[in-house]
Image: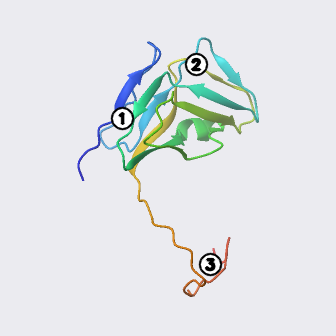
Amino acid sequence: MSQPLLRFKRLDPRAVIPAYQSAQAAGLDLCAVLDAPVEISTGAILMVPCGFAMAIPAGWEAQVRPRSGLASRHGISMPNSPGTIDADYRGEVKVPLINLGKAGFTIESGMRIAQMVIAPVARVVVEEVDELDDTDRGAGGFGSTGR
């Protein structure tokens, strides 16, 4: 599989180009673009703009995920983790952040707030049927396979 090209359009001059922080990193870091620091109070959700739009190649998606350090140290996560950005979206990239911590947390412009993994998308053909094949698990759901 060839390496996909992610085209980036700066919508704000302060936007930071998404970047890998190490040679083997899976995700590109996304940075906030804000006019002033903003506090996310406990339990609140904030849409944080990144100041850019992008063109993901057809057959690929961007999966936006929380940064592990913000989540483990401060309880800053995403309410829809992972979030998906489809290949045909051309609007500004924004990250919904939620504060699950015990104290308010301040987001500042330029802060790395999330990571974005570019992944291939499998498309399926949907077929309605009268019956499904049987399996050992059957309809067993949450926790049905043990611990």
Q: Secondary structure at mark 2?
A: loop
Q: Residue 128 location, x and y as percent? A: 56, 74
Distance from disc 3 to disc 2, alpha carbons, whole Å, reads: 44 Å
- Picture residue at 23% right of the left edge, 48% below the top: 2
Q: Residue 137 location, x and y as percent? A: 60, 83
Q: Which residue is mark 3?
A: 145
Q: Quadrant of residue 34?
A: top right
Q: Which mark is residue 20?
A: 1
Distance from disc 1 to disc 2, alpha carbons, whole Å, reads: 20 Å
**Could you say which is closer to the camera, residue 117 or residue 108?**
117
Q: Secondary structure at mark 1?
A: loop
Quarter of the image that includes the C terminus: bottom right
Q: Which residue is mark 2?
A: 108
**Could you say which is closer to the camera, residue 46 or residue 37?**
46
Q: Residue 68 location, x and y as percent? A: 53, 41
- Picture residue at 73% right of the left edge, 27% below the top: 104
The kind of residue on which mark 3 rests is Thr
- Picture residue at 36% right of the left edge, 42% below the top: 25
The kind of residue on which mark 2 rests is Glu
**Could you say which is closer to the camera, residue 73 or residue 121?**
121
The kind of residue on which mark 1 rests is Tyr
In this picture, residue 3 sits left or right of residue 28: left
First in residue order: circle 3 vs circle 2 = 2
Label 2: how many residues lie within 10 Å, few (<14), some (14-19) or many (20+)?
A: some
Q: Quadrant of residue 133?
A: bottom right
Q: Which mark is residue 135?
A: none
Figure disc tally: 3
Evaluate if marks 1 and 2 touch, with contact meaning CB atoms under 8 Å apart: no
Q: Secondary structure at mark 3?
A: loop
User: Relative to 32, does residue 95 appear above or below in the rendering?
Assistant: below
Q: Quadrant of residue 107?
A: top right
